[in-house]
Image: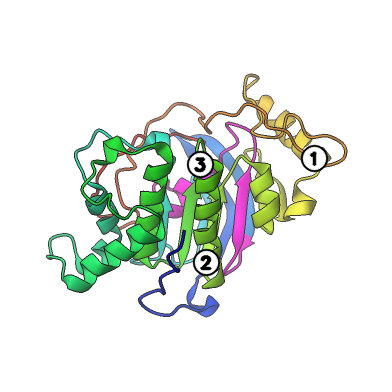
């Protein structure tokens, strides 16, 4: 991508970004825990990967952070329910692309926090949307229905929306799943840009090559924290084997994302992976998720998956 990263509307520093503290956090569905007794802190400006087997609770944890799931026990501290604090990109397969909305309108949702749902856009708003589309390589796609986009193009549009939200905390749920390497490289450039601005980025990922290359901190999750710290220390063979074993105790058929072929030398293969589904509950992710509790309705609606 040739476009330069846009500067945030209001310059952010690490001091503006909330620390996120989890205190004995338990999350689940219908009183059935999916994440158990999780404690730790995500420091301001962190670039944190969340990895683990299918069914480990990764997506569930993100839903707790955005406020979709109330804790069954413990608490989340970090003022994430304040307006405009969190931007969220759900899994692609949780988005209903049949909803009749254009690429321009999808990206424009990133301005709702500042402009309001029913206020008309002014020139500077349309200029900002055009710049965001150029940033992700989608200039000229403004009038295209989102249902006509490829998986990589849709993900670019969702990242353009996040770039307009100017949120200090950005949560990404499997943002690079089933997209080409060139798109991954481009979107990782945006992630690094957000990090360089002092924003906190938390991403559920299955590609350990991306994690090891770009994410200095990793939470290895198997319904509880197996390891949380520097990526090289978290992603050891012993830790990943333990995570797989703990999750299989709950679900014997759960494959381990990108971990099954880890060798003693620390290399990795590309094991088959699925999305982080747990108990099959469906949740509506149609919101723009610019913050944890005060969501504006958005399109396209989404069909969330549980992790």
Q: Which mark is residue 297?
A: none
Residue at image position (36%, 50%) is 157
Q: Residues within 10 Å of mark 1 (few under 14, many from 20)?
A: few
> What x and y, as percent, mark residue 259?
71, 34
Instruction: Give the residue pinned by disc 3.
Output: 59
Q: Is residue 77 left or right of residue 132?
A: right
Which element type, helix, strand or loop, lies under badge 3? Answer: helix
**Mark toward the start of the polypeptide (3 vs 1):** 3
Residue located at (36% from left, 36% from top): 283
In what element is the residue under mark 2? Answer: helix
Give how far apart the Cα atoms at labels 2 and 1 are: 28 Å
Task: Look at the image and tell me whether residue 292 can be seen.
Answer: no
Q: CA distance from mark 3 to mark 2?
A: 24 Å
- Alpha carbon of mark 3 to alpha carbon of mark 1: how far? 26 Å
* Residue 293 in view in this figure: yes
Residue 48 falls inside the magenta stretch: yes
Q: Nearer the viewer, mark 3 or mark 2?
A: 2
Secondary element under disc 1, as helix, strand or loop, is loop
Q: Are marks 2 and 1 in contact (CB under 8 Å)?
A: no
Left or right of residue 193, residue 93 in this image: left
Residue 284 lies, in percent from the top left, at 32, 39
Residue projecting furthest to the top? 253
Q: Earlier in the sequence, mark 3 or mark 2?
A: 3
- The residue range painted magenta reads 41-70
Q: Position of residue 92 (x, y in %)?
A: 41, 38
Pointers 3 and 1 in contact (C-beta within 8 Å): no
Is 5 within the magenta?
no
Residue to which mark 1 is pinned: 267
Q: Which residue is mark 2?
A: 193
């Amino acid at each position: 991508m040739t476009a330069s990263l846009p500067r945030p509307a209001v310059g952010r520093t690490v001091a503006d970004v909330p620390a996120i503290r989890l205190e004995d956090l338990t999350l689940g569905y219908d009183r059935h825990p999916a994440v158990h007794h999780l404690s730790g802190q995500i420091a301001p400006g962190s670039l944190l990967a969340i990895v683990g087997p299918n069914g480990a609770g990764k997506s569930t944890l993100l839903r707790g952070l955005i406020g979709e799931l109330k804790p069954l026990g413990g608490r989340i501290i970090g003022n994430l329910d304040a307006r405009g604090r969190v931007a969220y990109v759900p899994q692609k397969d949780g988005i209903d692309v049949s909803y009749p909305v254009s690429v321009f309108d999808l990206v424009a949702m990133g301005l709702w926090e500042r402009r309001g749902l029913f206020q008309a856009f002014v020139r500077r708003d349309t200029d900002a949307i055009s710049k965001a589309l150029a940033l992700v390589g989608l200039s000229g796609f403004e009038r295209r229905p989102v249902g006509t986009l490829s998986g990589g193009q849709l993900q670019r549009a969702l990242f353009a929306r996040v770039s307009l939200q100017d949120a200090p905390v950005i949560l990404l749920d499997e943002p690079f799943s089933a997209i080409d390497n060139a798109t991954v490289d481009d979107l990782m450039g945006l992630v690094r840009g957000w990090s360089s601005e002092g924003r906190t980025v938390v991403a559920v990922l299955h590609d350990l090559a991306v994690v090891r290359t770009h994410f200095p901190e990793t939470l290895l999750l198997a319904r509880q924290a197996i390891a949380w710290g520097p990526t090289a220390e978290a992603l050891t063979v012993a830790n990943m084997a333990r995570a797989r074993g703990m999750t299989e105790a709950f679900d014997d058929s759960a494959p381990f994302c990108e971990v099954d072929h880890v060798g003693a030398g620390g290399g990795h293969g590309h094991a088959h992976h699925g999305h982080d589904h747990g108990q099959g509950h469906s949740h509506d992710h149609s919101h723009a998720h610019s913050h944890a509790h005060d969501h504006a309705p958005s399109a396209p609606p989404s069909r969330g998956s549980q992790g």
